[in-house]
Image (tube, grey):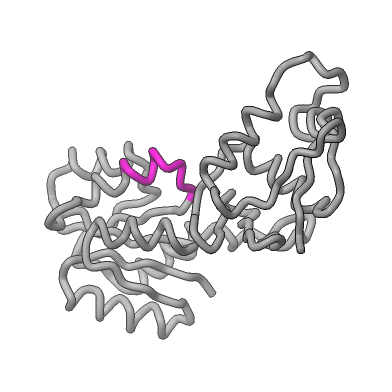
Amino acid sequence: MARLLVVDDEPRIRTYLNRSLSAQGHTVSEAVDGQDALDQLQSRDFDLVLLDLAMPGRSGLNVLSELRQLESHTPVIVLTAVTDISARIEALDRGAVDVVAKPFSSAELAARIRRHLPHQTPSPTGEPRYLEAGGVQLNLHRRRAVTAHRSASLGEREFSLLAHLMRRSNNVCSREELLHEIWDMDVDPGSNLVEVCLRRLRIKLQPDLPIETVRGGGYCFYDD
């Protein structure tokens, strides 16, 4: 089943959701506040987040804004007792995929979770969910890379570049090959597209990205 993160400052709510969702076969982790949630989301992969709005410190709305800045693709369902319609609308505007009012029906919540789990729709190509090489785990469904020291959501080009290099690990990929495969360019326009994209990857995943520049050849992802 799925890996879920329950974020709520009320222990009673967390315990209830943990028991209910675990009984449905999910693996459930708990976060006691918004900062705890962000810390866990940057260090581990989750399939879906259940997020309370009204919490001390970082509120649920603050967490949603932070996840959007991080380009996170993890779906978030907001669970809230807040009756203010504007707060619910703001949660959706900040990236929540759904809003469920407290108190809620466990059966309804289970249905909404099933609806928003990204892996419920199988890949038509039968592609595996992860690529793993050189100490990097790349989630192919959510464009997220995890290493021993970093976890980062990737932009579309960053993801495509890293995935291509990982699939061709220990082989040198020329700039021409990468421009063709990632940017659909058959002619090198003399730009630094590859270098800029690779620099962003290195910043996000340093010091754990085993990609080296091969002088006169291109780039190689080493999987030793």
Horizontal side, residue 7 vs residue 149: left or right: left
Q: Is residue 110 magenta?
A: no
Q: Which residues are magenta?
A: 65-73
Horizontal side, residue 75 vs residue 91: left or right: right
The answer to whether 63 is drawn above or below residue 218 in the figure is below
- The residue drawn where x is 26% and y is 80% is 16
Q: Nearer the viewer, residue 21 or 175?
A: 175
Expressed as whole percent of the image width and height from the top left, the position of residue 111 reads: 43, 66
Q: The C terminus lies in which quarter of the figure?
A: bottom right
- The residue drawn where x is 12% and y is 57% is 56
Q: The N terminus lies in which quarter of the figure?
A: bottom right
Choose top left, top right, bottom left or bottom right for residue 76: bottom left
Expressed as whole percent of the image width and height from the top left, the position of residue 193 reads: 68, 24
- The residue drawn where x is 45% and y is 77% is 27
Residue found at the far top of this picture: 189
Expressed as whole percent of the image width and height from the top left, the position of residue 115 reads: 48, 59
Q: Nearer the viewer, residue 154 or 111?
A: 154
Residue found at the far front of this picture: 215
The answer to whether 94 is drawn above or below residue 223 in the figure is above
Choose top left, top right, bottom left or bottom right for residue 80: bottom left
- The residue drawn where x is 13% and y is 45% is 84
Q: Is residue 66 magenta?
A: yes
Expressed as whole percent of the image width and height from the top left, the position of residue 148 reads: 53, 63
Q: Nearer the viewer, residue 216 or 20?
A: 216
